[in-house]
Image (spheres, rainbow, N blue to C red):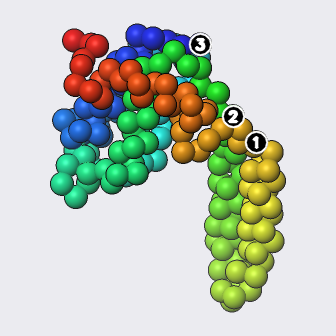
Amino acid sequence: MVDREARQECAELVRQFISGRMSLDEYEDRFTNLQHNKKDRALWEVWNFLAFLCEDSYPRKMTQQWRLNSGQWRQAAQAILFLQSDAEYQWSEKLWDGSVFLITAFCILLLFALLPETPLLVRFAISLPLIAAWQWYEHWQRKRTVVVGDKEAWPFLHQADLEEAARHPQLLNGNRTMH
């Protein structure tokens, strides 16, 4: 379900953030305060993309050495175009939520804590099956996630959809649709 108003606000936030007019902290605060429909996955996927793209360990603006490189800029521009469209977000949901990794890490830490007198090499050897099981599970989940779209067109599913949206940009050509 497309939340047009929230998408427009989010597109403007992304534009201001990637252009260096607001810090990551400001972006996250303003995004969190958006009144939006939780069913529009595009909002969350774009937010996750920017959180992954930027180190959220610092509240800097995207200027000087923190400026986006050309590939990152292209992806962010595509995200803005997508937010301006009425397209539903159609990429499959990520199936792995990190819980298996956390359980594996916890077990390894517990193993090291409970066996302090055991030689380090033995503790590593005992950890290997846990790591192998985690890697197998992650591989199995990736195989279950079918990518049906063009990764270069993300968040659009197909290149043709991206090209169509690019013919009518709003925020990327200097025109503002919000005040």
**Residue 90 image point, x, y percent:** 64, 27
Which residue shows up at 37% across the image and 17% down it? 8
Q: Which residue is mark 3?
A: 1
Give whichever of discs 3 and 2 has the lower sequence position.
3
Q: Secondary structure at mark 3?
A: loop
Q: Which residue is mark 1?
A: 146
**Residue 5 image point, x, y percent:** 40, 10
Is 76 drawn above or below residue 65 in the view shown? above
The residue carrying pointer 1 sits among few (fewer than 14), some (14 to 19) or many (20 or more) residues within 10 Å by Cα, namely few
**Residue 161 image point, x, y percent:** 55, 27
> Viewer-proximal residue, 110 or 53?
53
Q: Secondary structure at mark 2?
A: loop
Q: Is residue 10 left or right of residue 58?
A: right
Q: Amino acid at mark 3?
A: Met
The residue carrying pointer 3 sits among few (fewer than 14), some (14 to 19) or many (20 or more) residues within 10 Å by Cα, namely few
Give whichever of discs 1 and 2 has the lower sequence position.
2
Q: Which residue is mark 2?
A: 92
Which residue shows up at 32% across the image and 20% down it? 170
Is 125 drawn above or below residue 170 in the view shown? below
Residue 5 appears in the picture as rendered: yes
Q: Quadrant of the C terminus?
A: top left
Q: Is residue 143 left or right of residue 19?
A: right
Mark 3 to mark 2: distance in Å? 15 Å
Q: Quadrant of residue 83?
A: top left
Q: Amino acid at mark 1?
A: Val
Is 23 drawn above or below residue 102 in the view shown? above
